[in-house]
Image (tube, grey):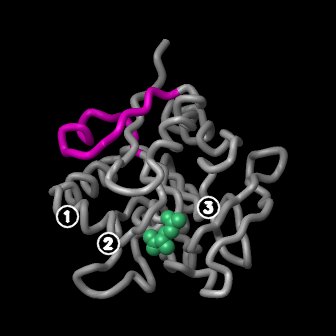
């Protein structure tokens, strides 16, 4: 049996690592750069990168509204770091006008961009993750955190007193980058969610 067809938004960011992680988790990953490709996938991963740049490219390529529409329609999605920012309903410190990160609204939450502060741009640590037996190694790179999570949002992991992994229905987001470690459990959770088993 073939796995679900999961798109990886390939405008900017570490696309390749997500494609590999999804393949290892039993999905059939494909890159998404245009509207016809977005319409053809069962689910979408939005990788880390720079949320303002990804937003700008989504606008340029006429993908912003189609993506919002698919999310509103219930398409499963997973966003890591910049992807978490974009999946929020509201973004704090979103950037300057005309070059701001634009919310796509997959999860009822408010996130703060670059929340961990200037001194600690990047760090890693082990975080407990709901449903997983042992902690995940979390790599944070100029990461956001969750400032407010709506009623329907499950906080799966926290760091520095804030949510760093959340889920609402079949939409998942992490402030960290599981694709950068060999641990495939977060991608496996997402593939199981897409399959209706997670
Ligand atoms: N700080 C970046 C942003 O605002 C996110 C960094 C990342 O994805 N590693 O989009």
How far separated are the C-alphas under marks 1 and 2?
10 Å
Picture coordinates of residue 66 (x, y %)?
Answer: 21, 52
- Residue at mark 2 to residue at mark 3: CA–CA distance: 19 Å
Q: For the point 55% across and 41% down, which residue is it?
A: 190
Q: Quadrant of residue 117?
A: bottom right
Element carrying mark 3: loop
At which x and y percent is residue 133?
Answer: 83, 44
What range of the chain is rendered magenta?
Answer: 27-44
Q: Is residue 8 above or below residue 121?
A: above
Question: Label 2, on which residue?
Answer: 102
Closer-to-camera residue (107/138): 138
Tell me, yes or no, if residue 109 can be seen here. Answer: no
In the picture, measured across the screen, residue 37 lies left or right of residue 114, that is left
Q: Quadrant of the C terminus?
A: top right
Q: Can residue 43 be found in the magenta stretch?
A: yes
Of the two numbered discs 1 and 2 in the rendering, the one whose residue sits closer to the viewer: 1
Mark 2: give few (<14), some (14-19) or many (20+) Cα within 10 Å: many
Disc 1 target residue: 59
Q: Which residue is mark 3?
A: 176
């Amino acid at each position: 049996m073939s796995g679900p067809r999961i798109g990886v938004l390939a405008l900017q960011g570490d696309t390749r690592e997500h494609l590999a992680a999804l393949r290892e988790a039993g999905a059939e990953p494909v890159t998404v750069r245009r509207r016809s490709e977005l319409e053809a996938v069962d689910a979408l991963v939005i990788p880390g990168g720079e949320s303002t740049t990804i937003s700008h490219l989504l606008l340029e390529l006429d993908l912003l509204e189609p993506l919002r529409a698919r999310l509103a329609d219930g398409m499963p999605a997973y966003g890591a770091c910049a992807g978490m920012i974009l999946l929020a309903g509201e973004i704090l410190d979103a950037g300057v006008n005309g070059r701001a990160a634009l919310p796509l609204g997959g999860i009822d939450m408010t996130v703060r961009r670059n929340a961990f502060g200037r001194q600690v741009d990047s760090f890693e640590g082990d975080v407990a993750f709901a449903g997983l037996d042992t902690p995940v190694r979390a790599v944070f790179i100029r990461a956001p955190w969750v400032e407010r999570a709506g009623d329907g949002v499950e906080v799966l992991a926290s760091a520095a007193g804030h949510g760093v992994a959340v889920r609402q229905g079949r939409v998942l987001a992490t402030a960290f980058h599981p694709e950068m470690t060999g641990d495939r459990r977060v991608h496996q959770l997402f593939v199981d969610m897409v399959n209706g088993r997670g």
